[in-house]
Amino acid sequence: MILRNSRTGAALAVRVERASTVLGRTRGLLGRSGLPQGEALLLEPCASIHTLFMRFPIDAVFLSRELLVVRAISALRPWRATRFHRGAAMAVELPEGTLARTGTREGDLLELEV
């Protein structure tokens, strides 16, 4: 799947991995040494995340069911946790710098292309 910002046309990720089971969401990015550019992890359902035990910072977006960006967080460092984001149905974890590179911000509508 490709995750694209419909306002800018920029691709946030060209390879999106979906974690929709309890085990998949619990594991998340744990144990990985990084997240390569162009890749993302979509956590669903999800309204908050943490980076406990992670070794690298990430960008994160919280999306509504309609894929509207409810909250965008740049450079979330390891050993941090976000608050619960009202209206968020899912979260996408991205390589650090993705939000700045693509110009993605709160209020943007994203698209998932198969």
Image (cartoon, grey):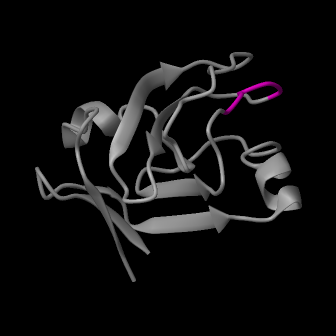
Q: Residue furthest front?
A: 87
**Left or right placement of residue 91 versus residue 45 in this view:** left
Q: Percent position (x, y) of residue 92? A: 52, 48
Q: Residue furthest bottom?
A: 114
Magenta stretch encompasses residue 23? no
**Residue name at image x 71 percent, y 64 percent:** 20
Q: Which residues are magenta?
A: 49-53
Q: Quadrant of the N terminus?
A: bottom left
Is 61 in front, or is 41?
61
**Residue name at image x 55 percent, y 50 percent:** 89
Q: Percent position (x, y) of residue 77? A: 60, 18
**Left or right placement of residue 10 versus residue 15 in this view:** left
Q: Residue furthest left?
A: 8
**Residue name at image x 19 percent, y 37 percent:** 103
**Left or right placement of residue 30 versus residue 42 in this view:** right
Q: Quadrant of residue 11?
A: bottom left
Relative to 28, say whether 49 is above or below: above
Q: Percent position (x, y) of residue 10? A: 19, 55
Q: Quadrant of residue 67?
A: bottom left
Q: Quadrant of residue 47?
A: top right
Is 62 in front, or is 66?
66
**Residue name at image x 36 percent, y 32 percent:** 97
Magenta stretch prevailing secondary structure? loop
